Structure formats: structure tokens, C-alpha cells
Image (cartoon, rainbow, N blue to C red):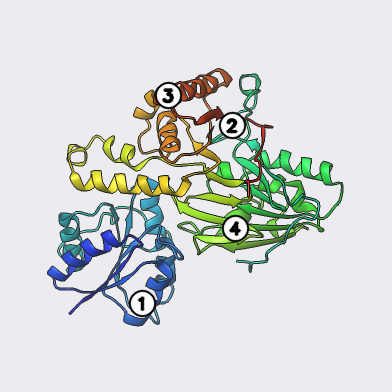
Amino acid sequence: MNTALLIDEDQVVRESLARWLRQAGFAVIEAADGEAGLDLALERKPDLILCDQLAPRCNGFQLCRNLRARTDLFPRALIILTTSGGFGVDRHGAVEAGADDYVVKPILEHDLARLVDVFRGHGETTLSTLPRAAKRGPAAPGPSPAVPPDLVSVRFWGVRGSLPTPGPATVHYGGNTSCIEVRADGEIIILDAGTGIRGLGLNLAKEFKGIPLSMTLLISHTHWDHIQGLPFFDAAYNPANKLRILGYEGAQAGLHTVLSSQMESPYFPVGFQQLPGHITIEELKDSTFSIGPVEVKTMFLNHPGVCVGYRLNTSAGAIAYLPDNEPYQRYKFHTGQPEVASSTEFLQYGRRMDERLTDFVRGAELLILDSQYDLTEYQTRVGWGHGCVDDAVALATNADVKRLYLFHHDPSHNDEKVTQMAEWGRTFVATLNEPLQVDAAREGLEVVLKPAVK
């Protein structure tokens, strides 16, 4: 009897797939995360593997690369990546990682029947026409003695998406790409390293005047607008400073490879290894970890590639950062496919995924959320991996968030347009009769959170 391995943290998905596979004659084994799935694959050597692209602890891309690199221990099984998004770039990522097929969830019975036909040699994979292409250890930096332990503040250094947009039309909200500084309970935590991180580095040097700093940089994903400022981060050139960089692996390479490749010649005159600061890079596996006294939670977002949001639980409340995300229900039901719009399975799945995101940000004091488009613009940008103001407000109100900052401003939006979107957000909140505060993120804005009353 052939064996199938299911790797998905969603028990509902595993149960339905397991039932259909058993009916098709497979013995089924299951794992709730990628690391356990990798161990089971090497131990049991299954004939068919279905793995969630965003499986925790070891995502589908990592699992594919690991198994394809160990041909001495692992036979050639059929590996199928499953995904909630279905972005075109992820299909190519699946090919690069070594997957045989790629299926968008929710997986219906006819999808599984096709995959079984592929396994038995009676069908072709959806990836068959796509071309195939031929870490430092963790070190917690510790708190920065110069940062007051009772301070919790958020400062925006870059608020744009896609690419920098300097000039007179963006002078109010700013033209730098994603970077946010959080000072919380004695820690300096940086969210993403877009071009805004240059200004942050210069300010840290001016403020602390040579005092050694310990910082943690959380990378949401490695699209260029979230990492392109790192080579210009002044604090990384001070040998007295410690910088710990955390993030997830992508489809083709690990975090260290991606960050260092943009500093290779001929792109940049200084190589990553030449940076004099004490820099460590850690590939994240656990969805919950700590930076000093700050508890950090992660959640995968609906955006091309491996993209995560962060929730920082501080002494003054939670700060949630979701820079790039497209709501699942919007994405699923604006695809133009009638069978999707009328499918109960798609409706239930999309709703369940959005509810998980609502739970993730629930009760946050401050939510920084992808609101790149207005509702009209979104209709022509379905599947791009970004959200609109209306959905941002709906998520924040449903989750009882106190303050919402519209983020990841579109490069085509000038100050007037961003202001209009913020005003519409406030109008929407007033219509809902909710207490949510709405504003558009802008460079230089600092928000100080008051400690929770004990």
C-alpha cells in the first residue's frame, strides 16, 4: 500500500484530505508542522507528500529543498505544495524548491483526484510547463542600557510600499519604504529594513553618541522594499553595536543568502561579511518567541512568497504589524471565477482564514496594517497581495483594536490621496459607531503608549 504524508497546521484540512486519500487506497500519516513532517518523511519515506507552503517551523519550500538534497536517504516521492494564496511567483518558487505540483486551497475532491492521477502516471502536473533552475547562529543581543525600561514607543521611518517616492508630492507622509522603530521595555526592535532604516541609523548615532546599542531587526519578508535599506544602516557599521536579524526562509534561499546577495559586487561596494557591527541572523521556526521581556508572535500573511506579521506584546499593550496582506475572502471572491464565488468550501475557508487574522490582532493597542488601495483601486488589483482601507477598518473594528495606522502607501499616491483615504477611514468608523482611531502612517510620527494600569 502506498503511503501519503499530510503536513498542515490546519486540522480541518488534514482531516478532509486524509479521508479522501484513504478512500483512494493510501495509508495516511500526518504532521501539524514542517519540522515534524520532515522527520516523518525521512523516517517513513512516503510515496506522496502534501505540504502547506506556509507550514510552521519548516515551510514547504524548505521541506522540498531538504528532501531533494538528500537523495541518498530519501527516494523520489511526489511532493505537492498547498497554498492559501496561489500567487504566480509562488508557483515558480515551488519549482525552484523542487516541488512536483502546486495546489490552491481549499482543496476539493476533484483536485485530489487529479493529483492521484499524476501520482499513478495518468496525468500531468500544473508545474510541468514552468522552467526549472539548476546561516549564522542565533545570538540574543540583550537590552540596550541607554533605553528606558519603562518606555514603549513606536516611530515611523518608512511608510511606503514597492519603491521609494521622494519629492514635493509626498513630503508630508514621506517617500521611504517600510521601517518602524519600536522601543519597548528596554529593547530596540526594528520592523523591516526598507529605505527608512537609513534615517533611523543616523538618528541612533546622533542620539546615543557612541554608546553601544543592542538591536533586533524583524524582517516580515524579503521583497526589496523591506530590505533595500539594510546596506545603508549606519548602526551596522559600528563594531560596538549588536544587531540580531530574524525572519523566515523564502522559496529559493535562506535569509542570510537573500540579505547578503544585495550587497554583492557589482550591486554594492561593501559585502555583508565586511560589515564591522556584530550581526547575527536567525531563521525563525517557532511562531512565538521573546526579545527580552517582549513576547513576539508571528502569523503568515496572504502575500506572494513567505510573508509574516508580527505582534509585540509589551508592558503597555500589543503592537501589531501586518505590512503586506490581502484579505482571503476578498481575494477568493474577486477572482472572476464563478465556481469560486458560488462555492461553500471557498466561503468557509476564506472566512476561517480571515478570522484567524482577526484573532491574531485582537485587542491590540496599535495596529499597523497594509491599506495600499482604496476600494475602487482594489477591484483592478485583486491577487497583488495587498489590502484596501475598507477592509483595514473592518479588521480593526472586529478585533477591538484601539488605533489603526494605514500603512504601505502606494507609490502613485500623493499626500492629498493618502489624506483622503485616512479621512474615508475615519468616516467609515463613524458610520459603524466604533471608537477606533484611524490615521495614515507618516515618517517622523512617534506614538508613545502608556503603561498598562496594574
The mark that comes first in sequence, 3 or 4, is 4
Whether residues under marks 2 and 1 lie with C-beta atoms below 8 angstroms apart, the answer is: no
Q: Position of residue 32 (x, y in %)?
A: 36, 67
> Is 280 on the left-hand or right-hand side of 93?
right
| Three-letter code for the amino acid on which mark 2 is drawn | Ala
The mark that comes first in sequence, 2 or 1, is 1
Camera-nearest label, 2 or 4: 2
Q: Position of residue 27 (x, y in %)?
A: 20, 76
Residue that carries the numbered disc 1 in the rendered image: 40
Residue that carries the numbered disc 3 in the rendered image: 428
The mark that comes first in sequence, 1 or 4, is 1
Relative to 183, say whether 8 is above or below. Answer: below
Mark 2 is surrounded, within 10 Å at the Cα level, by few (under 14), some (14 to 19) or many (20 or more) other residues, namely: many
Res. 246 mark = 4
Residue that carries the numbered disc 2 in the rendered image: 441
Q: Quadrant of residue 11?
A: bottom left
The mark that comes first in sequence, 2 or 4, is 4
User: Residue at (56%, 21%) from the top-left corner?
Assistant: 414
| Three-letter code for the amino acid on which mark 4 is drawn | Leu
Q: Is residue 315 visible to the viewer in this orientation of the structure?
A: yes
Q: CA distance from mark 2 to mark 3?
A: 18 Å
Comparing 450 with 215, the one in front is: 450
Image label count: 4
